[in-house]
Image: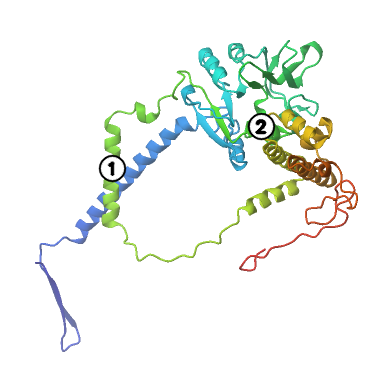
Amino acid sequence: MSSATTSARVGPSGRDTTTSATESGGPGPSDRGVRIVTWVAVVVVGLLLAALTAAVGRDDRERDVPLDPTSTSASGSRALVEVLGQQGTTVDVVHDADAVEVGTDATVLVDDSAGVLDRGVARRLARTVGDVVLVTDDPGVLESFGVDARPAGSTSSTRVAATTTCPIPAARAAGSVTVVGATYDTDDADVQRCAPSGSGADTRWGLLSADTEDGRVTVLGTTGVLRNDTVTRAGNAALALGLLGSGDRLVWYVPTPDGTDAAPSLGDLAPPWVPSALAVLGLVAVAAASWRGRRLGPLVVERLPVVVRAAETTEGRARLYARVRDRTHALDTLRLAALRRIGRSLGLPRSAHVDEVVRRAAAVTGRSAAEVGAVLVGGTTGDNRALVEGAAALDELEHAVHRARSGDVGRASRPAPDEPPTRPTGPTGSPAGPTGSPAGPTTATTRTRPGGRS
């Protein structure tokens, strides 16, 4: 066992006479430095190789694929997928036609913007899927889905087309849409069409809807409603949510050239020894970190943050709508929710068409279909008064449907003779005016949380 001793003596003259003795056999400072440098070099090389492998592996995943539901690039559709999830619609992205499992409340988006969908697969999907939103410019795919239409080129114009008179309910509720993407021509009078471009005999359409033997097919050429960079323009977001968010589940089918899986990844193309080499380097890095790394101390108890109420998400979105004065979008959200609740009260499935909900609601309440449609679909909202009136009308119609379904049809259509008519209330419970607008100024209520924050 090696040891080192040091002794110091002070002579009579005051000088320090120090003697030192070190036994040989132990590692010196230079040996320890060499080992440290070696392990540091190994760790650095391993980290560089891991970073290079990860960067190359992301190369294929981060390609700018148009309408990619997982891409955050300008041409991707990640923003729409996030909003659909917030609205309660589960989005399943599949690349295999055999994985397209459709339930009663499911909508299927077939994204054939790359033009690789096989016609046989398209015919099989058309027979098994009821509600389809189709993105394609292939005439064979259109024919396979039973839509009598022809591709008529594409347009890159950023012009906004009004859709308030469109026969397609989702487009009519959106109010407007940017005309960018594929266009179509059709001679079938039964095919509903919207978003025109051109005029006269040269009129082309960016949105078609047709009832086929197997269900309803909506051909979406105005793909700007799906893209991250244009979804917030005009009524694009409302149209996309109306077409794709009507059910509890959306199957986003992106076909591939072989009809099954995507192209091989970098891991599939790498030599067999690469994973083993990376695993060894990883183990070396972990061993070096365990040997030379700093030891952690005891665990520190940390107080958890305050639990946030789920309603704060809804309140935050409402404040955003108010800040940007997007009254139409706010009222459209209320209309969609009212449509679902009224349809549920009438015993209709989630996949029921808006027109069917309007007809049934009009029948049970004794109102005209035009009056009920104006409340549930309506148009743009110009000011705060129109927003409050629209919300009050939705609330009154929903209560009328509930009263009619419970058997009290007389009270659903008129108040009792000895009672004054019930007037709608504003957001804070104050009486509203004759048309549903607040009778006076309203006062916001502030809730104070523990800690003094409101």
Q: Nearer the viewer, mark 2 or mark 1?
A: 2
Where in the figure is residue 25, as x and y percent of width and height? 10, 62
Decide if residue 253 is on the left or right side of residue 41. Answer: right
Colour option used: rainbow
Q: Quadrant of the C terminus?
A: bottom right
Image point (53%, 13%), residue name: 119
Q: Nearer the viewer, residue 268 or 244?
A: 244
Task: In the displayed orientation, state which residue is furthest to the bottom.
Answer: 12
Which percent across, then down, holds residue 415? 86, 47
Amino acid type, mark 1:
Leu
Dot 1, crowdedness within 10 Å: few (<14), some or many (≥20)?
some
Image-based side of 152 in relation to 43, left or right: right
Q: Is residue 302 visible?
A: yes
Comparing 20 with 417, the one in front is: 417
SS under mark 1: helix
Residue matched to label 1: 281
Which quadrant holds residue 191? Answer: top right
